[in-house]
Every structure is written in C-alpha cells, then in structure tokens.
C-alpha cells in the first residue's frame, strides 16, 4: 500500500511539472474601456482583448461612426487610470439606430490577435469580433 501511494505521488508530481501543450491561447491583455453613452438611449461597454502584454501596446483608438443626431449627444466615460486611448465620434452614419465602432490597436513587436467585445442592454446580446493589431477591427451594433 505504501509503495502504491509513493508511486502515485511521484507520477502526480511528474505530471504537474510537464509544461502545457501548444494549444494554449497565450496571454491576452485587455483594454477594458471606454463606455460610450448615447443620450436618451443608454450606453455600451467596449472591451478589447489584445494578444500581447500591455508593454507592447502604444495606443488603442476608437472611431465611433453614428448618425449626426446620435453623435452630437454621445459621450465617452473612462477611468482616470485608463491606458492611452483615443476616442473620436464621426457624424456620418445614416441610421439613428446603428452605430459602427472601429478599433485600431497600435503595438510594437509584431502583429497580435485581438477580440473586440461590445456589451450593454441597448445592444442586447454581447457582440464579439476577432481581428488583429495593425489592422482596424470593425463592429456594428444596433441600438434598441
């Protein structure tokens, strides 16, 4: 009985020391802002997961394309300790109920995968789009 316990302990220890396989997705750093508020409609939360650590990311830019009436009343909320980002509202949209958010990640050291997520009661279900840095990831949402 003691031999089995020792043998089992050795096997478990060896298995715990073996590194994970290549199927792991890697490190993602998340830019967890901004929150975009549309006057009289509600707000949406934009999260960008970037396949590298924060030290490689220099800027996250958000362009929000909305109808002129929606863009005129739109506001952005971010915490004071937020990462370097830029948010612009472009009033060229043609629909009062549709907003397009373009996310561009500037990063050093190569191209990384990213995932942009938009959530909030005014868009219904959470929406995700996969893209990559050094390219613009675009997501269009319908406001309720």
Image: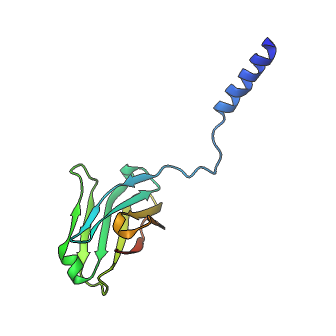
At 39% from the left and 60% from the top, the residue drawn is 48
Q: Quadrant of residue 65?
A: bottom left
Q: Residue 81 at x, y = what percent?
A: 24, 49
Vertical relation: 141 (above or below) 106: below
Quadrant the N terminus occupies:
top right
Residue 5, placed above or below residue 54: above
- The residue furthest top is 2
On screen, 140 above or below 19? below
Give residue 72's position: percent from left, percent from top: 18, 77
Q: What number of labels is visible?
A: 0
> Which residue shows up at 28% across the image and 53% down it?
83
Q: Is residue 3 left or right of residue 137?
A: right
Q: Work out whether residue 51 or residue 120 is closer to the camera in this orientation and state it.
A: 120
In the rendering, at what x and y percent does residue 31 appear?
35, 55
Name, please, the residue furthest toward the left: 72
In this view of the protein, which residue sits in the foreground, 129 or 28? 129
Q: How is the image coloured?
A: rainbow
Residue placed furthest toward the bottom: 94
Q: Nearer the viewer, residue 115 or 118?
A: 118
Q: Residue at x 80, y 14 (%)?
A: 3
x, y percentage for residue 20?
A: 63, 42
User: Residue at (38%, 59%) from the top-left corner?
Assistant: 47
């Amino acid at each position: 009985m003691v031999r089995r316990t020792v043998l089992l302990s050795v096997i478990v220890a060896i298995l715990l020391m073996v590194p994970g396989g290549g199927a792991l997705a890697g490190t993602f750093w998340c830019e967890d802002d901004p929150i975009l508020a549309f006057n009289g409609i509600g707000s949406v939360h934009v999260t960008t997961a970037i396949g590298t650590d924060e030290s490689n990311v220099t800027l996250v830019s958000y362009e929000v394309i909305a109808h002129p009436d929606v863009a005129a009343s739109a506001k952005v909320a971010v915490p004071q300790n937020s990462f370097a980002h830029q948010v612009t509202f472009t009033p060229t949209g043609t629909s009062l109920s549709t907003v397009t958010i373009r996310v561009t990640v500037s990063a050093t050291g190569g191209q990384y995968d990213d995932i942009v997520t938009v959530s909030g009661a005014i868009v219904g279900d959470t929406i995700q789009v996969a893209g990559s840095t050094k390219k613009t990831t675009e997501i269009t949402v319908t406001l309720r």
